[in-house]
Amino acid sequence: MRIAFTVHGSRGDVQPAVAIGTELARRGHEVRLAVPEDLVELTAASGLPTRMLAPSTAELLAGPLVKERLKSKNPRVRLKALGEVADHGRATSEQVMAELADVSDLLVTGPLAQDRADAIAQSRGIGFVPLHYCPLRPNASLAVRYREYPRPVSRAMWRLADQTYWLTLRGADRRLRTELGLPPAKGPLGNRLRRRGVPEIQAYDAALFPGLANDWGPQRPLVGFLLPDKETRAALANGDDATSRAVEWASGGEAPVYVGFGSMKITAEQIGGIVSSLLDRGLRVIGHTDHELPQHDRLLHLQQPVDHEPLLPECRGAVHHGGAGTTAAAARAGIPSVIAWLSADQPMWAAALRRKGAGSGNKLARFEPSDLDPLTDPAVAAAAARLGRDLTPPADAVDRACEILLDAAAR
């Protein structure tokens, strides 16, 4: 089979596609990837053919569109900003998707630009399957944000969010579908895929969202978190030994707390305040940031990328932004997470961990030293260890995702 992955977003969005793509390639299938410009070199290190899909995501995240307007208290400003994020690199993305669709049996995307990819796949008469890294479709099993609501209220809020997002895309989608010779779409993508029987792979674990699998049924399978195997992760690290040095430091004394915010743009004062609060508690700390941190004999300052898989099991807990990948790595390690979230799905992960008793969270702008208390709570540590044992092994999750994609490609 010929399978193309066109994935917008950050490294956390691209890495699950690499996990599936490398396994499909091992099975003898022809796999191609297209990713944002700043991730092409990294992704190509996996050995998979890779090309540019859209302009740099890092530049988008660092700009005022994401840092300010997307977080505005004015819903009109937020809605317009959401549409502009969706339009980021649209012309290039559409062209690359179309070129890959011309030589593929199946087009696969991450959470972003799914409507675009679906229309292009339809115009070429090939299959389409989206990957979701968190719950995105309406349901009654969980709240949209950190707070809990009655099931009917949750479902109504999800439907409103789904319809609102569709309204931000509808004009561009109509224009693209007209160019492709397709009739206008009616309503949000999830409803249309459901009617057509298209699977939507949920690349996260059912253990964190009890009831969601029953809510959605088999067409939205919760396969588990997707992670490239050890060899692929080593290739993506490109020979950097930062991970081995961090593991050696962590295992050389009392287990530290890992603090890192991935690709999120936070201030030196914000991460410095968290690190200092942990040091004030007498804890050892790994601070993973480009910002300067104070010198301390109980602090290891990391600036290079590291592999969370061998590092986090050597830690007692993690403070992070609540991205799906980091949340999954901490959960697999069986350690508590305290999530200092900024936006998007991050409060959802904090709420999921809170329900399991395995962590908690607060918005970064409201974060206080007391929010770190779960890291030293034995009950939270025990719950986190139980959660780690309950998660689907990544290799099993990758296998199941591959089978779903191959079945879709063969239709």
Image (spheres, rainbow, N blue to C red):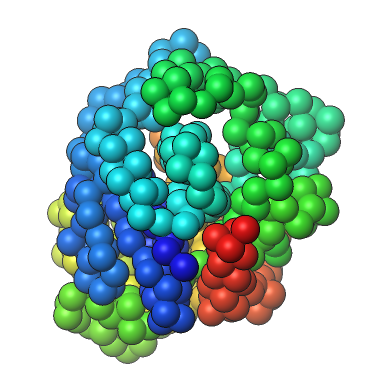
Q: Which residue is drawn at 22% across and 71% down?
A: 45
Q: Residue at x 42, y 64 (%)?
A: 2
The reply to whether residue 196 is visible in this rendering is yes
Q: Residue at x 21, y 42 (%)?
A: 56
The reply to whether residue 381 is visible in this rendering is no
Q: Which of 19 and 281 is in front in this view?
A: 19
Residue 352 left/right relative to 242: right
Q: Which of 39 and 81 is in front in this view?
A: 39
Q: Which of 150 and 195 is in front in this view?
A: 195
Q: Position of residue 14 (x, y in %)?
A: 37, 57
Residue 14 left/right relative to 227: left
Q: Position of residue 307 (x, y in %)?
A: 33, 73
Q: Position of residue 130 (x, y in %)?
A: 53, 49
In this picture, is 78 found above or below 303?
above
Residue 218 left/right relative to 404: right
Point out the image quarter for the C terminus.
bottom right
In this picture, is 72 found above or below 48?
above
Residue 88 occupies quadrant? top left
Q: Residue at x 47, y 37 (%)?
A: 123
Q: Position of residue 204 (x, y in %)?
A: 59, 60
Q: Nearer the viewer, residue 318 or 172?
A: 172
**Number of marks in the rendered image:** 0
Residue 21 left/right relative to 94: right
